[in-house]
Amino acid sequence: MNFFKKTLLALMTAGATVGASHAQELRIGLSAEPTSADPQFFDSAPNSALAAHLFGSLVSADENRKLLPGLARSWKMLDDTTWEFKLQPKATFTSGEKLTPRDVVYSFCRIPFVQGSPGTFSDLVKTIASIDAPDDETVVIKTDKPDPILPNRLISAFIINADAFGGGKNIKFKKDGCEDFGDNPNPSDFNNPAKSVGAGPYKLAEFTPGSQIVLERNDNYWGEVPHWKRVIMKPLTNAGARVAGLIAGDVDMIEAPSVQDFERLTNSGFSVARALTPRLLYIQLDQNNDPAWKSPTVKGVDNTPMSDRRVRQAMSMAINRQAITDKIMGGLAAPAGELLPYPMFGSTKDFPVTEYDPEGAKKLLAEAGYSDGFQITLATPNDRYINADKVAQAVAQMWTRIGIKTDVDAMTAGTFFGRRNKFEFSAFLAGYGSTTGEMSEKIDALVLTRNPDKETGTLNLSHYSNPAVDELVTQAKQTVEDKNREQLLQQAAKTAMDDVALLPVYFEVRPWALRKGLTYSARSDEQTRAMSVKPDTAN
Amino acid sequence: MNKPLPAFSDRSEAPWRQHLARLLASPSAIIGLALLSVLLLLALLAPWVAPQNPYDLSQLDVMDGMLPPGESLTSGFTAWLGTDEQGRDMLSAIIYGMRISLGVGAVSVVFACMIGATVGVLAAYAGGKVDAIVMRIVDLQLSFPSILVALILLAVFGRGVDKVIVALVIVQWAYYARTVRGSALVERRREYIEAARCLALPKHRIVFRHLLPNCLPPLIVVATVQVAHAIALESTLSFLGVGVPVTEPSLGMLIANGYQYLLSGTYWMSTFPGIALVIAIVAINLVGDRLRDVLNPRLAH
């Protein structure tokens, strides 16, 4: 034992005993602050997490993104382009008003027209052609083309109250601007507790940017009333300050303690929760085999070695994923073999993770004609993903050991993305999450042939292209039946992984830490929800 | 003021010998010099002294990561100061980091000094508009904090030891220009310069052979202070994530790296490089302080 350990342990146990007095109050240290309480203002995890407390959406999702009834108690597909949603008859807003189809139409109408939105939700409703209400509890949505994942997207389409914000009496959904829309509230109106009306389990009591957000329980909530009467969210963007706040008992729960502190918190009696997220850290390798192309950061050879599948396979086999997740990510990551973790839609159970085999990798390299190896630079952003520059160094070690002498070029995310999109890297490490929690979104962006016109392969900067994969995904997008669609996506993902289209490294695990006596059912969408924090029965 | 510099008046004994004797008369300077020589020796002989080459990725193994001081690595030797998360032996990393830090400090100071001194002495000799323009540029540059200028430069240049050196030269030359100009203005009016002019010696000869050598003492003092400053600046830049490449950490980057682990009890990753940096800077400042006393003509007797 040394001095540091002792002091830290003492501090931690002291902190863990404080805080029991606020029996029905929960104080949360947020890693990122919501920019507005307007649920349609900004498509980002912190904003959506706050919105989930204050508002409801037609479809909700459980911890693992399985769809659950929300403000819609059920939904079904009438034909390839028509969905019918049955509204929850008990659902009411905090104003006491009952939920009607008009609220749904008003909400969807406003989504593309939110004033000053830094990142809109308009993708959620872009396929919707019309919305009808045959009766007061039914909403029928027609889409332009078959849209099998519409319910997945509607998870983030929060419903606001038409009357509270002055929606038109005879509002009618139109693709480029609704008829009789009425007033379009300013996003700042939602930050005013007097004006904010939602159908969520909590009501807004205070919204002070940079200081705190206070929520009061909505005791008339139509669903299960949450345990905590009062929730205080404090933005503590510095990871060290967050952990210190938890140890000192200033907050009961924190988001994202740093990888470095997590183990220590676990060992000293704090309650922790972790969720496997769909965020994949992957390496893309330049596969352009055009003889006129000089791969930007490859040295020692004239062509692009990574256009040979065997070389890519060898580079994948050289990576000791378990060592990276254990040693560098402190257990807050899971080795990845494909694009999405099981059981998310389109992933395959027990998909094999490429095994660590440096000897086999060397043999494969020799077979491909690179027994003398070559030189490469692995680029990575150093301020975007947790420990990415350290992971890149570890990968560089492992590649160097099989004969591919690797340098690491770590830079700020702004520089990185700019240069990456200009194809300035022969190898780069980056991450990609998921908003829908299913395969087609990720495969579309990372693996399909890059085609700006069709908006496919937007993040495929490796020149990888396999018509078979493209075809499978095109088919899947037109397949409405879940089971068939999932099979097509699984097959597409497997084909791409067999080609070593990219090297999956690991999925991030999102951690939370709570004072002793609390448990949190962690969510893979990385949202922090007071509703999912429960005291142990003993308390 | 018209009295010639005492240190240079007595031609019977080599002046540097006098200076050295007076430098060594101070115990703190001796300690500083001793520490500095040890560090310099370690830095120069790093490949032979360090148990591991921390910049050779093939010698590192993440499985050796974050071992506390005194544990053995898989490759056999003992990491007396522990390892970082990449499995880098901290002792080796500090020795190599010291090499980068001292090297960057010394090289950037030499170049900044050469450029600054030339500009300063030329400005002083030319006088008039040239002098005014050059000195306003110097004023402008000195009005910005050096760390800010260096950060902007490195954001443009990218990472690399050479780029850090260039950035440090750009932010530091102005100090030398101003110092040299100040003393050159005084020297310019002295009899020996006038004598040289009467002999119709070429201008460059007067400037570089007569004027510049007599401006050296204050320049040396500024340079020793600036070496320490340059090292601290390089460490700050690396700490902030610009500067040297991540695979070749300098002391500043080692500290930044370990800093993230400080709260989790892995103290050795930032404490030891921090101590090494403090020792280096204190040693240079001790020597520099005494050097200033020795070379200051007003304190000579």
Image (spheres, coloured by chain):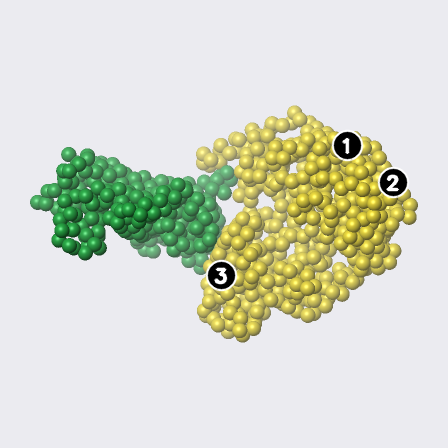
Do callouts 3 and 1 mark residues in contact (Cβ within 8 Å)?
A: no
For chain B, the rendered hue is: green
User: Marks 2 and 3, how far apart in space?
Assistant: 59 Å
Subunit of label 1: A
Distance in Å between CA atoms under marks 3 and 1: 55 Å
**Label 2 crowding class (10 Å Cα cut-off): few <14, some 14-19, many 20+?**
some
**For chain A, what colour was chosen?**
yellow
> Where does the image place residue A67, in percent across and percent down from the top left?
77, 49
- Viewed as shown, does residue B158 lie left or right of B287? right
- Identify the element where label 1 is drawn: loop
Q: Is residue B273 visible?
A: no
Of the two numbered discs 2 and 3 on the same chain, state the one appearing first in sequence. 2
Residue A452 visible to the viewer: yes
Label of residue A218 in the image: 1
Secondary structure under the numbered disc 2 in the rendered image: loop
Disc 3 target residue: A377
Comparing A224 with B147, the one in front is B147
Callout 2: residue from which chain? A
Q: Amino acid at mark 2?
A: Pro
